Amino acid sequence: MVNVAILERIFWFDEQARRNRFPNASTLSHRFELSPKTAQRCIDAMRDRFGAPLEYHPSRKGYHYRDDSFVLPHFQVSQDEILSILLARKLLSSTSGGFISRDIERFSHKLISRAGGMGLDIGKIDELFSAAWTGHSPVPADTFSLISRSLMASRCLRFTYRSPATGCRTTRVVEPHHLQYYMASWVLTARCLLRDQWRKFYLSRMDQVSLTKETFIPCPPNAWHHLFDGVFGIFQGGNPVEVVLHFNPFRARWIREQLWHPAQRM
């Protein structure tokens, strides 16, 4: 079975070549934030594994099809895999300013058409499934896109950050390492060059976000995983404190249904 991420690259490259837009390894790597070698391997796989009659055009510096009648083979994508993608689009539709859902929906249409429908209808999925967030912190699509690119390319980010405690705004330059989805809010873990410390930043509190030209070598996970270990949700402090909570018998019925902390004892 072909990896869904690879399928998306193949479909995109196939469409570009079919429209005589002469895509190449550079355009493919830029579109999907790949290394040039990985992009070239994807092109080679189209020719070697799927028999795509791709031919390089020197003057246009890109590929086109020698035979316009070529059609990509039928890929084995299961109904459950497509349903998972559609549900991801639905569940995350409002949390990233539409950045995730827009791209996933576009790809979902391609997958469904290539797989012959499989009885799935995007409109019906929207009727049958939904998600509701309490305390939802929306993020503009441009902000989410820039931060995603900075994570994948290990490039520094510059933004203005608003403190919820004081309301003051400071300009930060950070080295992003991890993006966490917590209680319907996106939170970035990064090394702040201003404070020279690890910090967590809510995307909804960022303004004037931009990529800098500086790149960095990411630190290993053990350098920043302490920000996720021994915490309650997203909150962390000094030494752990044991907490005992008492609930009356009536309210305890609801408390038992949810996991509040991985180390809890009921």
Image (cartoon, helix red, strand yellow):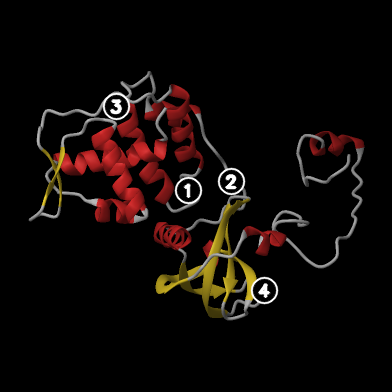
Q: Residue at x 48, y 73 (%)?
A: 159
Residues packed near mark 3 inside 10 Å, few (<14), some (14 to 19) or many (20 plus) = some
Q: Secondary structure at mark 1?
A: loop
Residue 175 x/y as whole percent: 53, 69
* Dot 3: element: helix
User: Decide: marks 1, 4 in contact (CB < 8 A)?
Assistant: no
Give the amino acid type for the residue marked by disc 3 in the picture: Arg
Q: CA gap, disc 2 to disc 1? A: 9 Å
The x, y position of residue 58, in whole percent, is 10, 53
Total marks shown come to 4
Where 146 falls versus 210 (above or below)?
above
Q: Are marks 4 and 2 in contact (CB under 8 Å)?
A: no
Q: Please state if 195 lies on the left or on the right of 104 as rendered.
A: right
Looking at the image, is mark 3 or mark 1 earlier in the sequence? 1
**Residue type marked 4:** Ala
Between the C-alphas of marks 4 and 3, the distance is 51 Å
In the drawing, what numbered circle is on residue 133?
Answer: 2
| Quarter of the rendering containing residue 185 | bottom right
The 10 Å Cα crowd at callout 4, few under 14, some 14 to 19, many 20 or more, is few
Q: Which residue is mark 3?
A: 114
Depth order, front residue of 76/38: 38
Residue 89 appears in the rendering = yes
Direction from residue 3 to residue 132 in the image, left or right = right
Distance of label 3 from label 1 (alpha carbons) = 27 Å
Location of the C terminus by quadrant is top right
**Nearest to viewer (mark 4 / mark 3):** 3
Instruction: Identify whether 113 is placed above or below 102.
Output: above
Q: Could you tell me which secondary element the residue under label 2 belongs to?
A: loop
Outermost residue to the front? 48
Residue 165, disc: 4
